[in-house]
Amino acid sequence: MIRSFFSLKWLYRLSSPKLFYSISGKAIPWLLSVSVALLTLGLFWGLLVAPPDARQGDSFRIIYIHVPSSFLALAGYYFMAVAGAVGLVWRTKLSFWFMKSAASIGASMTFLALFTGAIWGRPSWGTYWVWDARVTSMLILLFLYLGVMAMIRAFDNKEYGQKNGAILALVGTVNVPIIYKSVDWWHTLHQPATLKLTSESTIHIDMLQPLLVMILGFYLFYALTICLFLRAEILYHEQATSWVKDLCARRQEKSG
Amino acid sequence: MRMQFASLYELIDMDGHGVFVWTAVSVSLLIFLILVLLPILSHSRILRNIELAMETEARSLRNADVKK
């Protein structure tokens, strides 16, 4: 069992569009209900119950959207780039479609991180925007996402576009550690990381708990949207195959 | 769990920070809604197109049989 898990055969089988389509179809209702429940709980907890920040007052509550969306913007970039690399090496169709889906969702998350950051900046920094290392490198991340999205769609030959998009995504990964480290390498207005894996976090437990709930909720929501986007991609690209036609025929029978 | 705000007005106002917090929350909810609806709509549009194409194909096959 454990050996077969590490042999990655399960992953290879999951890269079959048909199998992924049927498994994700079953997973979507679960992902939807659990992520909505977590996000509702996290927002309620963070906005209404958590104590206000000693210095920033109630404006700090934006953290409950800003930090999770930034997490997903960065992690999502790795997911996208890894999918692109897998597509380039093993030529699995599903990886490129995953990359395309992850690009749209990641761009939305990056926009959300920048937008909530700007709104948070007004009460705490006195300005919506600064050309500060963290903010600027995040803006570059948004442009990289948009670049990958445009590259995938830029060629009549779809395979060519996907390969170029994957290469751009891989080159752009150099930006992600720069974003992480920007608050340490340069003097920035942006505060240093709140959550750290290697040392103690600089946030009180009462504020931390709802934040962790929100982060988990965002991750599950990300998984949900990946499934939704990928299923549309699969259906579009596989419409000439027999399994999609069978699926449609069964649907027509059901609806009469 | 104890609420931080005594009244609905205090919750909306948040010591003058409410406009920032609630803008951030509502824009996020809007983006989340779009992220869910967009793929669902395109999924059903693709399904409809495939089914239409299958119906047209079936009809033309039937017509060809009649002509014979």
Image: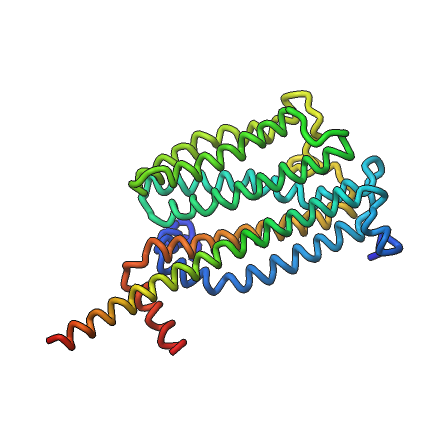
- At 64% from the left and 24% from the top, the residue drawn is A131
- At 36% from the left and 61% from the top, the residue drawn is B49
Residue B67 lies, in percent from the top left, at 13, 75
Residue A205 lies, in percent from the top left, at 77, 45
Rendering colour mode: rainbow
A206 displayed left or right of A178: right
Residue A247, relative to residue A153: is it above or below?
below
Residue A20 lies, in percent from the top left, at 40, 58
- At 56% from the left and 52% from the top, the residue drawn is B34
As drawn, which residue projects farthest toward the left?
B68
- At 60% from the left and 27% from the top, the residue drawn is A136
Who is closer to the viewer here, A149 or A209?
A: A149
Residue A253, relative to residue B45: is it above or below?
below
One can see residue A102 in this view: yes
Residue A218, relative to residue A117: is it above or below?
below
Residue A92 lies, in percent from the top left, at 33, 47
Residue A20, relative to residue A138: is it above or below?
below
Who is closer to the viewer here, A219 or A105?
A: A105
One can see residue A13 in this view: no
A134 displayed left or right of A103: right
Quadrant (top left/top right/bottom left/bottom right) for the N terminus of chain B: bottom right
Quarter residue B68 falls in:
bottom left
Who is closer to the viewer here, B68 or A15?
A: B68
As drawn, which residue projects farthest toward the front?
B67
